[in-house]
Image (cartoon, coloured by chain):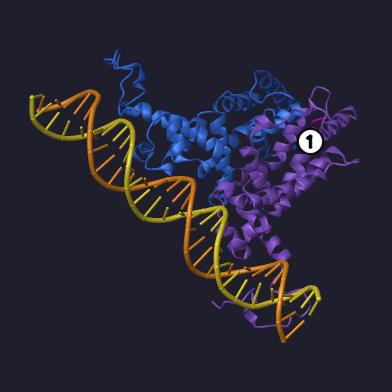
Chain colours: A blue, B purple, C yellow, D orange
DNA sequence: AACCCTGTCAACCATTTGTTTGACAAAGCT
DNA sequence: AGCTTTGTCAAACAAATGGTTGACAGGGTT
């Protein structure tokens, strides 16, 4: 190995268009976050190794401390990104099946992050959560119930809880998914079938 | 601390009925398994600390190596126990709602183990699982479909996947459960409502 | 050109952590 | 009673791991 920076194995270039700078804080940051997402998703916070994350990102592990203040900081940064995106999901004029499928879609394109989120949910301390029966998402469901999308004998709170579980089933039980359906959980075919089946179940809630 | 064995703080007794032996391999084993179940459920395999397990069990941590060959061995032992019990669930003459509620019931009385199981599912390598569309549990569902318990437009494989997800929702999302319903997920009231709501959803699958 | 801030790395360090070792006593056996 | 096996513990150990330090060069600024 030679002691130069970046992946400049192809020889010295005179920064052709500003896109291949060998020192790019933003790129390093992003690479670390992306890599960490996978590692944390695979092994969890405790199981993930900072060295593995750095290696996957192609940078020195010290940068994790430099940019995020350590392993935990990196973890938090990713989680923040997750919550931010999730908050933007529900909106006015979105039907229930739409919303569910939206979550499903998101889970498909962010498997690692979903895995990480599930682990986080498992790790989290449930005692320090406030009850919020007036939360926005719940009110949305109540409105849907009045509109007839959900039967009057069902409790929107439990319905929402159930839906959240349904949406992550594939990520939570990849092995079961494969065993039962005979399909690869990552495949397009599985995804299509899942969409269809889930929609049918959601329709039945009415 | 004095260098004597057992919890004999109350003074020396002459083994009154064979139940308070201070050296009891079986008791130590069980204590370790029980303690580990909680620790692994709370922190996961990587996050759990052998010292914490031993402390919770009230024995020396070395016994983990002695009896189970180490942390991993203890983990495997517990997992084995889980699978063994689960295999005994489905049987002839059990209706679908019954079966689901049975899983629900089991999850309630074994929260730690369920948590641990979920983590394991998340950790596991899905690639080394064989597709088994002729599995026993699936055939059972197909029979139920013919009997009218499941609509003909639903695929038993996905239904089973969904049901498994529904049953663990409470353990997977304890914080959400509390936030949405306003009830403590461990409380009897939550459990009763959950039973009821879940049953209604399962009925709707027909 | 001289200077300085920033990005990056390799080596080092302190701690944590699972496991091994060695001692020792409780029970069982002869 | 004496011997052996087994259960248990405290202390020592080695490996792993996250974080810190110090060097150094790229780039922009003066």
The image shows residue A119, relative to residue B60, as above or below, that is: above
Q: Quadrant of the C terminus of chain B?
A: top right
Tell me the magenta residue range: B201-206
B81 or A114: nearer the viewer = B81
Identity of the residue drawn at 69% across and 24% down: A194
Q: Considering depth in this image, is B179 or A35 the residue closer to the camera?
A: A35
Q: Tag 1, which secondary structure?
A: helix
Residue under the point 91% across and 30% down: B147
Q: Quadrant of residue A204?
A: top right
Residue B192 in sight here: no
User: Does the stretch in magenta take in B149?
Assistant: no
**Residue B152 placement: quadrant:** top right
Vertical side of A119 occupied by A55: above or below: above
Q: Residue furthest top?
A: A16
**In this view of the protein, which residue sits in the foreground, B199 or B76?**
B76
Q: Is residue B35 left or right of residue D12?
A: right
Q: Position of residue C9 (x, y in %)?
A: 33, 33
Q: Chain of mark 1?
A: B
Q: Nearer the viewer, residue B140 or C27?
A: C27
Q: Residue B80: where, in percent of width, then height?
A: 73, 47
Image coords of residue B18 (percent x, y): 78, 75
In-image side of B169 versus A112 (left or right) = right
Specify few, some or many for label 1: CA neighbours under 10 Å numbering under 14, 14-19, or 20 or more: some
Is B202 included in the stretch rendered in magenta?
yes
Task: Please indicate whether residue A22 sits to the left or right of residue B130 in the image.
Answer: left
Q: Residue drawn 70% across and 47% down? A: B79
Q: Which residue is mark 1?
A: B202
Residue A191 in sight from this viewpoint: yes
How many dots with numbers?
1
Q: Quadrant of the N terminus of chain B?
A: bottom right
């Amino acid at each position: 190995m030679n002691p130069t920076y970046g992946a400049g194995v192809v020889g010295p270039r005179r920064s052709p268009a500003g896109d291949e700078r060998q020192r790019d804080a933003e790129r390093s940051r992003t690479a670390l976050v992306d890599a960490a997402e996978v590692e944390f998703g695979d092994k969890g916070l405790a199981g993930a190794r900072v060295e593995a994350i750095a290696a996957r990102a192609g940078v020195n592990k010290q940068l994790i401390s430099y940019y995020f203040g350590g392993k935990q900081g990196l973890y938090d940064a990713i989680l923040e990104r997750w919550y931010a995106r999730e908050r933007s999901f529900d909106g006015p004029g979105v039907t229930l099946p739409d919303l569910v499928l939206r979550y499903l879609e998101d889970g498909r394109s962010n498997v690692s992050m979903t895995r990480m989120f599930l682990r986080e949910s498992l790790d989290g301390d449930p005692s320090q959560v406030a009850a919020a029966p007036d939360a926005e998402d719940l009110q949305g469901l109540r409105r849907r119930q009045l509109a007839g999308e959900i039967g009057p004998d069902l409790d929107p709170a439990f319905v929402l809880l159930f839906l959240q579980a349904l949406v992550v089933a594939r990520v939570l039980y990849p092995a079961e998914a494969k065993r039962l359906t005979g399909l690869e959980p990552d495949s397009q075919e599985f995804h299509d079938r899942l969409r269809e089946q889930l929609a049918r179940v959601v329709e039945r809630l009415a």
